Amino acid sequence: MEFVSHLQYAVLMIPALFIAMIVHELGHGYTAYKLGDNTPKVAGRLTVNPFPHLDMFGSILFPAILIIAKAPFVFGWAKPIPINPLNFKKIDYRKGMALTALMGPLSNIITAVIFSILFHLFLTLSQQLPPSIVKTVLLPLTLFFYLTVSINIIIAIFNLLPIPSFDGWRVILSFLPLHLERKLENLDFYGIFIVLALFILGIIHILILPPYIFIMSLLNMPLNIQF
């Protein structure tokens, strides 16, 4: 990057990552709240304040490792928002869980669309303003918008993978017979180990990159940018 160093890139990555993680959890929390479950509100999780959402490993250590290693993509996760589907009043609790699970990734996609519009707007402005303003203000902001789009898409796809405890897994369970759902729920503990295995074996990018490239192309976003 000519104008943006790796350090600046890492610094811009942090707020972009926090936005994606918080948006994701708020998607779950507000959906559950609107369906009648007051648990997320009582837990103090319906807030844009990042601190109640942070998970030491998923929100800080894991993304830091990826950034330091210059991984092809960076993502993380926040503390899951507590939800009690038995409190749902406006929908069957299994359908409610499926909807609540889907709203996390959907919130990320909506956020990606919004920031892609900002990216294209600022990219256009950068061609019309003095180079000094472009270098010091517009290019860092444009990179921040790009990273926010990229991370939100990655987190949406990542969470839709059918891995125990993930959103995609929750959706699948909601359509299975109840007795089978209850048996498979016991696999949630192994989700993080499956993720680590996918990373170690180099499989995770095979699962994420094709849909990532497809969604980025729909938003007319480049797969990488050079400043």
Image (tube, rainbow, N blue to C red):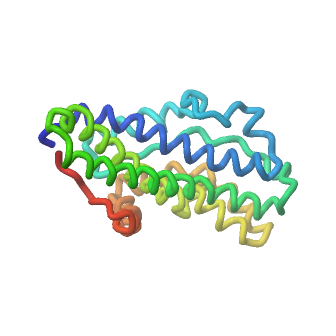
Q: Position of residue 112 (x, y in %)?
A: 45, 54
Kindly indicate the quadrant of the structure image that contains residue 83.
top right
Q: Position of residue 86 (x, y in %)?
A: 85, 51
Q: Residue visible at 73% across and 58% down?
A: 97
Q: Residue visible at 31% across and 39% down?
A: 141
Q: Residue visible at 43% across and 41% down?
A: 17
Q: Residue visible at 58% across and 55% down?
A: 166
Reply above or below: 97 against 180. Answer: above
Q: Position of residue 119 (x, y in %)?
A: 34, 50
Q: Name the outermost residue toward the top.
A: 51
Reply above or below: 127 against 178. Answer: above
Q: Nearer the viewer, residue 55 or 198?
A: 55
Quadrant including the C terminus? top left
Q: Is residue 137 left or right of residue 176?
A: left
Q: Is residue 70 left or right of residue 215?
A: left
Total count of labels: 0
Quadrant including the N terminus? top left
Q: Nearer the viewer, residue 170 or 106?
A: 106
Kindly indicate the quadrant of the structure image that contains residue 91.
bottom right
Reply above or below: 126 against 52. Answer: below
Q: Is residue 200 left or right of residue 77?
A: left
Reply above or below: 185 against 132. Answer: below
Q: Position of residue 187 (x, y in %)?
A: 63, 56
